[in-house]
Amino acid sequence: MSVEATDAARQLAATKHRARLGALLSLTLLVLLALLWVLLAFSTSSFWTYGNITNLLRQGAMTAILAIGETFVIITGGIDLSVGAVVGFTSVIIAWLLTHGYPIWGALIITLAVGLVIGVFHGFGITKLGLPPFIMTLATLTALRGIGLLITNGATISITNTDFTGFSRGDFLGVPNLFWMVVVVAVPGYIFLHHSRFGRYLFSIGSNTEAARLSGVNTVRMIYIAYILSALCAAFVGILLAARIGIGNATQAEGWELQAIASSVIGGTSLFGAIGSVHGPLLGSFILTTINNGANLLNVNSFWQRVITGVLIIVIVYFDGLRRRRR
Amino acid sequence: MANKPSTNQDAIQGDGDNTKGAADTVAPVLALKGLDKRFGATHALKAVDLIFEAGEIHAIVGENGAGKSTLIKLLTGVYLRSSGEVFWKGQPVALATPHEAIDLGINAVHQEVVLCPHLSVAANLFLGDERVRYGLLQHSTMVREAQKILNDIGFNLPAGALLSSLTIGQQQLVATARASTRGTRFLIFDEPTAYLTRQEAAQLFALIRRLKTKGVTIVYISHRLEEVFQLADRVSILRDGQLVSTQRVSDTNEQALITGMINRAIDQVHYKETVPFGDEILRTENLSGKGFQEISIRVRAGEVIGLYGLIGAGRSEFVQSLFGRFPKTAGQIFWKGKPVDLRKEKDAISRGIALVPESRRDQGLCLNLAVGLNINLPIYKRLTIASVINPFAEAAAADRQIREVQIKTASRDALASSLSGGNQQKIVVGKWLNHGAQLFIFDEPTTGVDVGTKAEIYKLFAKLLKAGAGIILISSYLPEVYDISDTLHVFRRGRLVATHDSAHVSEKALHETILTEAMGV
């Protein structure tokens, strides 16, 4: 009896240990981010200025939102390669709608609906047609850019609605509006993933789809939901991007899907599914953004920035995996 | 100790009789009429009629392949029956999906744990049925309730722990707890004690008895006959997809059950050619490792050594260590008289040991590559000039083996996946012959193959023996291993418990002896 009791205690301890590791990873990332900021503040005169910090928050906001959406998909064991293309495509949609006289609220709803439809299409391809998520979203990646270019005939649509573009430059309580948008996505995202049954179902699908299905979890619907959320986040970012740069162009946001995946993975999400959080990708995306921002300020060749980003991903994920294995 | 369970059982049977008295007027919980299932040419279940009463523990026994798994899958809605009728409390039901079965109150605890390792015990218990308030998960409520459920049913498990931090046995108990707490009226256990410790098994039995008193019908499938007699009220025997008999356990005994399980005409397919034995190829002396202890066997050229036992008896682990996959912990291996240390698969392969694994799809073949490529995979080094493949040598080597082991394929360029199961097996054998293997280990070579292919596989054995190779054959199908082997070793719980020389004397009495040894009755 006592043997079993200590056994149970040991298992609880192991579980708590793992939870602590998760917290430790977030903490490590937080420390890393702080360290980067301190280093940059000392080595450049322009980093620690209101203008640059707000700029950094604006830049990081979009990757962060994409990364949160991407994380829902990765937790199910899937991948969404299309998010960058969806951003470009929806920037065209909202620009077109605004230049054709739609009111802002109408344009917003329609654009988000387009994102929803894209997500439904992904879910359909993956669950009904049985396509691997990688292939399905790779296909829409290239197709959406094509459709976007067809709509504008390759041209760029300029947005003249200053109410719309002004939003991205504005701030609230001294914090840029774009960063508030991260809060708007992340807080419900956190509740959804960690405190609702749907979040739990996403984890269970990534852990053992069969077990989830046999438990009466509607796995097909949950996969739809994951891809819909990812596409909705991307469409939202498309709107923010259009507001920020004042144009709609389908070739925008090239390679952002990889930024989003990298942010998510740096934030502790496992590409095998079932492990991940909302706060991890948030930190991951701001680390990546800080590195790019800092490299700019330090006049590091932008080609080197890509190399540094690549090396950083390998190092962080390696150490994370090392720690997980040791347990 | 022997008395205690039986008195216990008497009390339970008393209960059973009471419920049955009432059941004369009420329809049984579940009734099967002419339940039948075919998979293509295979007739897995043949017109089975069975009745399950409320609150009874009904054991089902039978050899591997007797149709027990098929029956479970039909009852839980995983498979759809080919014909026959199922009545739930007198009403005909379709049982077309797992969902329908769960809604009726039919649940199963499978031999392998089907839960989410990344989630906590509590989360697994409530998966699909979470406690939610205002749309938010009630984490602490669920952990508290889960702990209460676990304590109530006598399982000492931490509800807050991650499932993956538990042992397999404990995970199995979690699965049991899950299956028994969701309005379940009919619960099927498939070999539930296979991975449990003695203590855990006792906890499980206590739970089963408690469920019974609450009127839940239990179907208990096990190879361990002593458990059947400890627990069950009635026992049904399945053999070759047919129901042999249903009896009260008090009206039968272990020997009678075993006789019922194997009473069949000895299969005529088992073709065996006797070859004079040559020199010793491999010998083990008191070899021990994970899952097996102190195994001593000898294989000579031209000899088939059969390893028989139930699933989990340690046979696969034993041969895996011969193949260098798991290191031995004690004892010695001799290869042609000299002691050898087989630490990696490479060590075994280079000496000439070939493993034809149980799951060809996973371990033996690159299914979506060409037949020729599969055959040549171990010997590409010999087919190259300065690391560039010589296409003529490659083609010649592939064609030679295709002829040698008579693989039926359109050409060496056909995909391995396009071949039948038996021919895929031949590719694996051809591959190792090509490499010059002298000891072939076959792990369940005939599971899921039809009779014709079986015969071909046995002919292939004869060919290997004539070529001077030795064979170790693992099989859970007694007639096969019995007829094909020159020497038959019986494994039970990691130990070699009996050895029969020149076993291929078809004699029913010996059959019974061997099955009795393997089950440890």
Image (cartoon, rainbow, N blue to C red):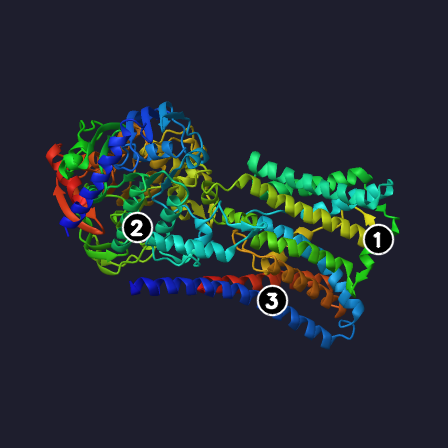
Q: Does the residue at mark 2 contact the one at mark 1 (Cβ under 8 Å)?
A: no
Q: Position of residue A151 (x, y in %)?
A: 80, 38
| Amino acid under disc 1 | Thr
User: Mark 1, mark 3: which one is toward the viewer?
Assistant: 1
Number of other residues with Cα within 10 Å of mark 1, as a class: few under 14, some 14 to 19, many 20 or more: many
| Amino acid under disc 3 | Leu
Q: Is residue B486 visible?
A: no
User: Mark 2, mark 3: which one is toward the viewer?
Assistant: 2
User: Disc 1 designates what residue?
Assistant: A165
Q: Position of residue B385 (x, y in %)?
A: 45, 47
User: Disc 2 designates what residue?
Assistant: B195
Number of other residues with Cα within 10 Å of mark 2, as a class: few under 14, some 14 to 19, many 20 or more: some
| Amino acid under disc 2 | Tyr
Label 2: state its secondary structure.
loop
**Alpha carbon of mark 1 to alpha carbon of mark 3: how far?**
33 Å
Of callouts 1 and 3, which one flags the residue occurring earlier in the amino acid sequence?
3
